[in-house]
Amino acid sequence: MPFESRLAAPAVALPLLAAACLLQLLGIVLAAAAPVAAGALLAVLLEVLMLRRRWRGLGRRLGRIQLSATVRHLVRDGLLLVGLARLDALHPVVEGVPLLAAMLGYWGLHFVCQAVAGRVRLSRRLPVVTRNIDASALNLTPAPPPLFGRQSTLRLAGVGLLTTVGMAATALTGYALWGALAAGACCVALLAGVGHLAGWLLPSRRPVGEAEALAWLDAWLAEYRPTIGMYFSGGTASAYQANMWLSTLAELDGRPVIVLRERFMVQKLDATDIPVLCVPRVAHLMRLEHSTLRVLLHPANSGKTSQVLRIPTIKHAFINHGESDKLSSCNPYAKAYDEVWVAGAAARERYQSADIGVEDKDVVEVGRPQLAPIHPYEGPPVPGGTTTVLYAPTWEGWTDDPGNTSVVLAGEAIVRALLADPAVRLLYKPHPMTGSVDPRAAEADQRIRELVREASAARAAERGERNGGAEGAGEGAAELERRRAELEALTTCAFRRGADEAERMLLQGAPRGSRTARVEEATRAWEEAYWASFPAWEHRVVTGRRPGIYACFNRTHLLVSDVSSVVSDFLASQKPYAVVNTSGLSEADFKAGYPTVRAATILSPDASGVPALLESVRHPEKDTLAQARKELKTHLLGPSEPPSLVRFNQAALALGAQAEARNARQTNGHAARLAEAEAVGREARDDAELVGRQALADALGDEEGLCP
């Protein structure tokens, strides 16, 4: 939502809430029914509006200053009752008492419902969350109705609306019966809801307890016997770091498993048949020590990584989620792992020059196995045809380095220069975390998106295809929707609204047969339908999970990016690429400091080099960097033979063998220590027995002694 829209809701709603309260107070002071009823109705309508997505932020802000939905409803109902008393609408007593009793009853039942709902949620929150694992032994059941189980604000708004209307009618007519009937109906509904909700606390509908769940986890680990896994912890926008390794993990020898730490991340992973375990608590994570798991691969560093590194029976390898020349690619955290796996010699040299404590013997070159889908260079654009350019800048990062992203300092200039060429079709794919640290990056990103959309609309108008191409666009959209539905059917599980973790675990049990080949085919079909759903000349802003960055690589003739792993991956295609220099360094120093740009055209922030760059793409004889790209590809990504996946698998097997050898040494050493301790104990017992015999002999006066 734009910043202005986020401000609009509070700017309108807060004065209206204040006005509603003042109206009720005015009605109480003047003993006037109309202001009392109008103020209450206005307040409850605002509560209903706050349920809408655009207004939810206001409710959260009010909650932070202790004006939660419950407090607001209590204040409104309290003022209403005071107003009714001021209007003498609670007399005679025979009519007023039922109204007061019904109001107290509905509020009491609301709090009882909250307590029962909290108990139900707690009972359904297991110490482990799974996916692609048959967890039916945990007595998993569907979640209770969300209206009573989780949506307390919606429930309160519903009963509040009904009771407010009833009491407003009482204020206007003087008959307490209307309010009593409304509040009584709410009591009946809440009582039925509480009774229904309490059924989820019965043993037959409640998942097993923590001890039973952990015992089940131990049994599953013993039965499945995992050998290699991927460990991941991160925020909502970081799931791509794990998703890029799913296909590689599935191809490795052994029995793979994915270990997560955040519950929400279970549903953030892309489609996979690999068993997924989410173990939020450290104490429960330590149970992996007694499993057959020998290798854990780490695509990212996080605060929770240190917790799993405590397990001595497992060897850990840092595989990163992309390699670049940025300082973040040589994090000192890497020395905590047993090995650091890199693509090629460039990364090895990067760690050596960074001097952060990573020993060269611990660096293993394995290539980048997930780059297999990237198509090789097939030649320049067709003469007179469209030149597709992908602008894929990275995000601003956690440091304050101006060279991290070109979006802020050069993005708009780059995009304007590319859009100025009538033969260019621009694909703009921003990093998913753009703007998450620096608001200036978010604002620049929005301006770039608007430039692309305006240029695309202008081009459509020039070609007269806004209406003329409607029929073809409709067919393309229909085909895309059909392919999307096919892909979603394979990659997602249809959850009903209100499903919780336990219900999702039940629905996402062990997969029936391998879906990998079907998902790959469905993904290719969706990508073809996506690119065919709009004209080949149309500029696009590409966001979301699909199409992925590699699919964009395969549709482009030229990449414009920053110093990032996108550049390293794009080199697999050996197509021309350019890197924007916003670091403040000279071009010579920039190339010397960042090896991945040595085969790139360097663009300045003013984008003055764009025309010459496009000319070299269209005319290969002017491309002086082709050989440099070929050499740099090998330096960055390693040799083509043996294939990267083979080298990766060999590294995994070798590290697993190291873990087995270490554990065998520990086991043998422990056995030897036990044997030695037992021998010492026997010797001590023998000595004690001899001493006892001698003491007895001395006591009996036997000079010969009792000892043999």
Image: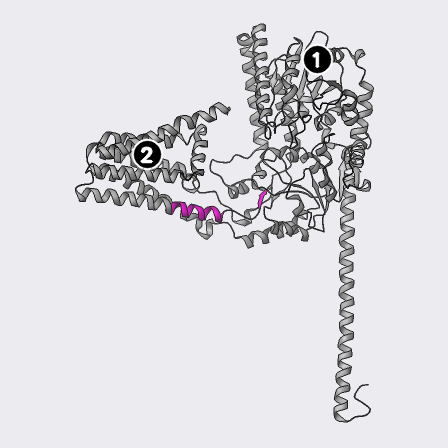
Callout 1 crowding tier (Cα within 10 Å): few <14, some 14–19, many ≥20: few
Residue depicted at 44% across the width and 24% down the height: 8
Say whether residue 115 is visible.
yes
Say whether residue 270 is visible.
no
Residue depicted at 78% across the width and 47% down the height: 657
Per the image, the residue denoted by label 1 is 608
- Colour style of the rendered protein structure: one colour
Mark in the foreground, 2 or 1: 1
Q: From this view, report whether residue 447 is shown above or below residue 313.
A: above
Q: Main secondary structure of the magenta part?
A: helix
**Quarter of the figure with residue 630:** top right
The quarter of the picture where the C terminus appears is: bottom right
State if disc 1 and disc 2 touch (CB < 8 Å): no
Tell me the amino acid under the disc marked 1: Ser
Tell me the amino acid under the disc marked 2: Leu
Image location (x, y in percent) of residue 627: 83, 20
Q: Residue furthest bottom?
A: 701
The residue segment tinted magenta is 112-130
Question: Depth check: 1 or 463 in front?
Answer: 1
Disc number at residue 161?
A: 2
Q: Secondary structure at mark 1?
A: loop
Callout 2 crowding tier (Cα within 10 Å): few <14, some 14–19, many ≥20: many
Indicate whether residue 82 is drawn in magenta. no
How many badges with numbers are in the image? 2
Image location (x, y in percent) of residue 398: 64, 33
